[in-house]
């Protein structure tokens, strides 16, 4: 443990990540490392044989091809009979090795998780950006079968890098203007094939992090009459990314091109680069529906989880019909200045000893969580 922590500390110091307003980076990095080190960790790739043998890889590939085609037809870019299929045998062969087919990133909820969000497919609620039909398959890496009874939750920042439902210094202009909308946040059940589908946008960038979409996977949650969920457990907290060249094109379109925040590229994001270790691939696989980004996008990703793992997401706010209200005792309250989870990046200049002590504590907590 000690050499690892020393390396991490050195890496953080070298990149200057600790000095960023996005001070939760360090906590994320340590959690991620604890996950990678966990003896029972398994990625989706480990299930390749079973998923191919059961026909699931082929089925899902064909379903996704058909879905993209359906979107193209609906938008007037193809005729119904024009579906061109890729050889499914080739897809099976490449499953798990090909970009964006598998991933298993285990990271933190971050400072802007709002609990109590609505079950809904369309998350746009008036936000503008590169509209993305996003399709996630959830796989149980302990049984190598799709999970048909989970709830998938996602949230991302808007095209100019602001999160809804929260107020914090550095989240947009720091005013409370975004507190009263739940745009770009929502929950969907996985259907019989283990698939959850959303309509959202490619997230904008904000200081200190590469563009990303957060996810949390819920198990055993109860459906409430007002279309929200409660209780159950959370097995997985992750983040998805967008390939840099494509993202560069998105950033040139309106309204992304009005974002004044400094951008962090994928290769500068420590957390993302850790996410690529151990065979994980945290990139969404994105296709154009038409001839340009503005015509809309279709994206998918497969997520491997161990449903018995229990993470403890720490929401800063709870969504109500009056907007996001603070969760009492949240470790993110006061972010980025005074919060309990801010760690040493949250404004207090730490000593190296302080960092190592904090890191040890994090990893112990994480090991307990993963039991
Ligand atoms: C699962 O996907 C396959 C392939 O698209 C489809 O034929 C089947 O109906 C789906 N099953 C369910 C229960 O949705
Ligand atoms: C993102 O949200 C902020 C706060 O609500 C808002 O001021 C801004 O206009 C939004 N960005 C876009 C592109 O709409
Ligand atoms: C949904 O119902 C729960 C339980 O009564 C309540 O706590 C929550 O505020 C409601 N959510 C919304 C968005 O109305």
Image (spheres, grey):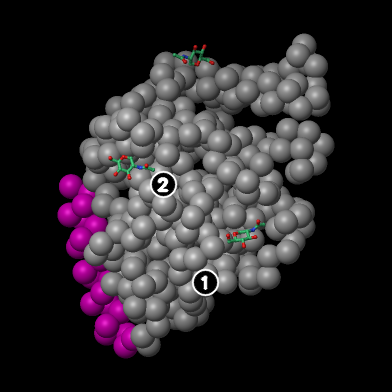
Helix, strand or loop for the magenta stretch, by majority: helix
Expressed as whole percent of the image width and height from the top left, the position of residue 66 reads 64, 19
Residue under the image location 37 percent in, 87 percent down? 349
In front of the other: 279 or 143: 143
5 horizontally vs 124: left or right? left
Alpha carbon of mark 1 to alpha carbon of mark 2: how far? 22 Å
Callout 1 crowding tier (Cα within 10 Å): few <14, some 14–19, many ≥20: few
Of labels 1 and 2, the one closer to you: 2
- Label 1's element? loop
| Count of numbered tags | 2
In front of the other: 332 or 211: 332
- Label 2's element? loop
77 horizontally vs 216: left or right? right
Picture quadrant where residue 149 is located: top left
Between discs 1 and 2, the one toward the N terminus: 1
213 horizontally vs 33: left or right? right
Give the quadrant of the N terminus.
Answer: bottom left
Residue designated by label 1: 174
Q: Please say whether residue 364 is one of the residues in the magenta stretch.
A: yes
| Ligand 2 contact, mark 1 (Cβ < 8 Å) | no
| Ligand 3 contact, mark 2 (Cβ < 8 Å) | yes
Task: Determine the residue located farthest toward the front in the rendered image.
Answer: 322
Instruction: Report if residue 228 is visible in the image.
Output: yes
Q: Please say whether residue 121 is one of the residues in the magenta stretch.
A: no
Residue under the image location 52 percent in, 33 percent down? 121
Q: Which residues are magenta?
A: 350-371
In front of the other: 371 or 55: 371
Task: Determine the residue located farthest toward the top in the rendered image.
Answer: 81
Tell me if residue 141 comes above or below residue 20 in the rendering: above
Residue designated by label 2: 321
Discs 1, 2 touching: Cβ within 8 Å:
no
């Amino acid at each position: 443990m000690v050499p690892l922590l020393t390396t991490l500390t050195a890496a953080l110091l070298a990149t200057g990540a600790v000095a960023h307003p996005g001070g939760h980076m360090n906590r994320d990095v340590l959690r991620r490392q604890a996950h990678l080190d966990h003896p029972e960790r398994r990625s989706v790739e480990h299930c390749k044989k079973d998923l191919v043998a059961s026909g699931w890889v082929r089925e899902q590939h064909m379903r996704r091809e058909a879905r993209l085609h359906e979107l193209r037809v609906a938008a007037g870019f193809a005729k119904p009979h024009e579906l061109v299929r890729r050889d499914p045998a080739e897809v099976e062969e490449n499953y798990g090795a090909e970009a964006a087919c598998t991933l298993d990133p285990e990271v933190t909820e971050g400072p802007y998780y709002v609990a109590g969000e609505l079950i809904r497919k369309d998350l746009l609620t008036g936000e503008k950006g590169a509209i993305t039909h996003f399709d996630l398959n959830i796989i149980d890496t302990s049984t190598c079968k799709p999970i048909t009874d989970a709830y998938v939750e996602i949230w991302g920042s808007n095209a100019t890098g602001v999160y809804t439902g929260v107020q914090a210094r550095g989240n947009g202009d720091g005013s409370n203007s975004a507190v009263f909308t739940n745009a770009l946040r929502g929950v969907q059940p996985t259907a019989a094939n283990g698939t959850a589908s959303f309509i959202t946008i490619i997230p904008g960038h904000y200081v200190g992090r590469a563009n990303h979409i957060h996810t949390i996977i819920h198990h055993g949650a109860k459906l409430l009459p007002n279309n929200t969920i409660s209780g159950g457990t959370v097995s997985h907290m992750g983040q998805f990314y967008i390939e840099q060249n494509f993202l560069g094109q998105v950033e040139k379109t309106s309204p992304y091109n009005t974002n004044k925040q400094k951008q962090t590229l994928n290769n500068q994001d420590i957390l993302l680069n850790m996410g690529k270790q151990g065979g994980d691939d945290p990139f969404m696989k994105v296709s154009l529906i038409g001839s340009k980004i503005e015509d809309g996008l279709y994206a998918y990703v497969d997520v491997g989880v161990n449903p018995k793992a229990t993470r403890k997401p720490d929401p800063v706010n709870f969504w109500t019909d009056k907007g996001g209200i603070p969760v009492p005792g949240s470790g993110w309250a006061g972010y980025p200045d005074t919060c309990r989870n801010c760690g040493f990046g949250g404004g207090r200049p730490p000593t190296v000893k302080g960092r190592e002590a904090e890191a040890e504590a994090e990893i112990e907590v994480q090991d307990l969580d993963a039991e």
